Amino acid sequence: MVDIAERPTGIRSYRGLREWLERVQSIGELRAVKGATWQEDIGRVAEMLTHTDGAPAVLFDEIPGYPRGHRVLVNSNGEPRRLAVTLGLDPDISTEGLMDWFEHRMDAMEPMPVRYVDSGPVLENVDEGEDVNVLKFPAPFWHKEDGGRYIGTGCVDITKDPDSDWVNTGTYRVMVHDEKRVGLYISPGKHGRIHRDKYFARGEALPVVIVVGGDPVFFIASSLEIGVGVSEFEWVGGLRGEPIEAIRGRHTGLPIPAHAEIVLEGFAYPNNKLMEGPFGEWTGYYASGSREEPVVDVKAVYYRNDPIILGAPPNKPPYEAHRYRIYLRSALLRREIRLAGVPDVTAAWCHGVGGCRLLNAVAIKQRYPGHARQALHVASQCRAGAYLGRIVVVVDDDVDVTDLDEVMWAVCTRSDPERSIDIIKRAWSGPLDPAIPPDQKGFNSRLLIDACRPWEWRDQFPPAIGPDPVYKRETREKWGWILRGDEPA
Ligand SMILES: Cc1cc2nc3c(=O)[nH]c(=O)nc-3n(C[C@H](O)[C@H](O)[C@H](O)COP(=O)(O)O)c2cc1C
């Protein structure tokens, strides 16, 4: 574990996407591409990048039909070195170091209130009334069967709880309907949906601000399961060690990051709906099809000169969001299980193939009868693991949870179905679940597999050959140069 005192607190923090691009350029992980079309090419390339190890971030410019400078960025956090830049860390930090830092930082940090300012780059252009035109920006068609252009994928949707001061941000997809209207899809149970439902139940409009191009760290915070009542703005401020600068939206009063690229501000009204979707989703399907969803009437568009859309189109898992969530959601999961009082959780891993939700593995050092079942049930129902999960496996600490072969080896050799399996029924799922029939979506069940050595006769269980995760890492540190073909340092 990294000593929290030695952690480089926010010293490499940056302001906005432009500074982030400079840093990523300086580590050689940014490519510029000209002439790709919004109708097809950008979506195609995004898929290729997200499914290729080592792929760069790509900034599309000179998109046919749009002025030079109206750009789209994809694959921003698809590699750990860029994720480190986003978090303000040294790009060369190990992924274990990054996860330890993240977990400890969350334990140690205090959320930091937003610093409101009167001006910022996002005010370089403000279109209101007749001038509002969302089609001004080159929102791509990301997948072949999408029902429309999606301007919001790597977006940050800001709403406020009508009953308190809680301002939440979530990444909820945004489809373009026409110049002045966009569609907003929020799954049941998400914080923005709870806010929305409260307003609608009172017959009131939901005020909303949607950042469709901005600082990648906001996107990361928005797309992670941060606790109820916590503002992700304050959370990012705490993570960085300096407050986020925001202006107040002219129509909603909601905070708008001062360095954002493109921001839509408007209202969704209770009975104003249009068909939304289909959209290629993170499970690898167009599973939620199309259905009527609330429409946001856009009252103002704020944007920088030469604005950039931050794209993060879902694709078959693992895609870009899974490539960074593998580290961050795994760290969140390990922390939440620990905070729920389960001792000796040595590792947790949200496997990319399951979209970091459908297949999670936890390792424990077994201390008492029932310890394994406790870890399993908490892992499947805590905030980081509850939504649209499917399979959770618990293993002993000699198994490397990051290695699917090892996890399945433990399942194959240490579990016995009659003793090792629990099923939880009627758990939190939603419209995106491909395995649930269209008319029954909402609930799903969970398979919990105890693949630890059986507690009662663990001492007679045959010794495993190994290596355990520590031994395995040491071997790779010392002898990995043979695989890489370079010389020992
Ligand atoms: C690229 C991307 C797109 C997403 N799209 C949606 C979406 O359309 N609707 C939704 O409910 N969640 C979506 N999510 C997941 C949420 O952002 C995530 O569950 C987040 O924790 C929600 O914030 P909340 O916990 O404050 O509700 C998306 C995540 C990513 C990374």
Image (cartoon, grey):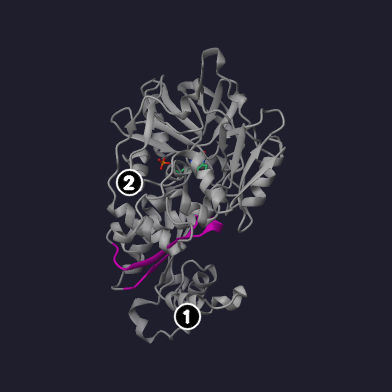
**Residues drawn in magenta:** 342-366
> x%, y% of residue 11?
37, 50
Image height of 461 relative to 242, above or below: below
Circle 1/circle 2 CB separation < 8 Å: no
Image height of 337 relative to 200, above or below: below
Using the rendered view, name the quadrant where residue 218 is placed: top left
**Which corner quadrant holds the N terminus?**
bottom left
Q: Residue at x 50, y 40 (%)?
A: 17
On whether residue 372 falls in the magenta region, the answer is: no
Using the rendered view, name the quadrant where residue 79 is placed: bottom right
Residue nearer the viewer, 75 or 147 = 75
Q: Residues within 10 Å of mark 1 (few under 14, many from 20)?
A: few
- Label 1, label 2: how far apart the Cα atoms are: 39 Å
As drawn, the label of residue 241 is 2
The reply, left or right, for residue 49 in relation to residue 466 is: right
> x%, y% of residue 454?
38, 77
Element assignment for label 2: loop
Tell me the kind of residue under disc 2: Gly
Q: Is there any visible trace of residue 448 in the rendered image?
A: no
Using the rendered view, name the quadrant where residue 253 is placed: top left
Tell me the kind of residue under disc 1: Pro
What residue sits right under mark 1 in the picture? Answer: 467
